[in-house]
Image: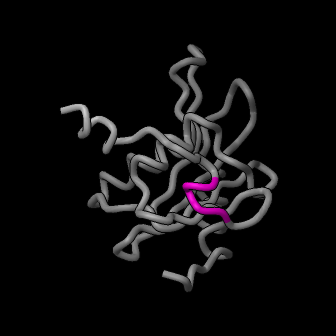
Amino acid sequence: MTDIDWDDLRQVATEAMHRAYVPYSHYRVGAAALVDDGRVVSGCNIENASYGVTLCAECTMVGDLFMSGGGRLVAFTCVNGDGQTIMPCGRCRQLLFEHASPGMLLETVSGIRTIDEVLPDAFGPRDLEDAR
């Protein structure tokens, strides 16, 4: 899939960002991804008074992925409250890797990158399969 409409994906992420629940940090994040079957899934960050159980936008987006039929992520972007593209944290890169199609593209602060470029030498399901 080389014809990714990044503007549309960013718009979906921005719409999700407006639904964020951020009473503590006030830092809104929205995420959106294209799925290998053509669907677009999205999510927003959901904070909690016990900060450790806060859900990142990528987490709720993966929930949307599975609630709407599963599949593999092909392209991903996330934005902050100002609509600027931001980089997923390390934890979220790992989450994205788990559900990425090979070569998944991410819109990052430094341009379009593959999942392997933003999480090189990643640990994933194949490593666990090899241990069986």
x, y percent for residue 32? 55, 60
Residue at far top of view? 50
Residue at far left of view? 132
Tell me the quarter of the image containing the C terminus. Answer: top left
Which residue appears at 60% of the width and 69% of the height?
Answer: 9
Query: Residue 88 vs residue 64: left or right?
Result: right
Residue 50 part of the magenta segment:
no
Query: Residue 89 vs residue 121: left or right?
Result: right
x, y percent for residue 47? 59, 28
Q: Does residue 42 sit above or below 54 in this rendering?
A: below
Name the quadrant containing residue 5.
Answer: bottom right
Q: Which residues are magenta?
A: 113-117
Query: Which of the pair 96/64 is nearer the observer?
Result: 96
x, y percent for residue 71? 31, 62
Query: Which of the pair 87/48 is nearer the observer?
Result: 87
* Secondary structure, magenta segment, majority class: helix
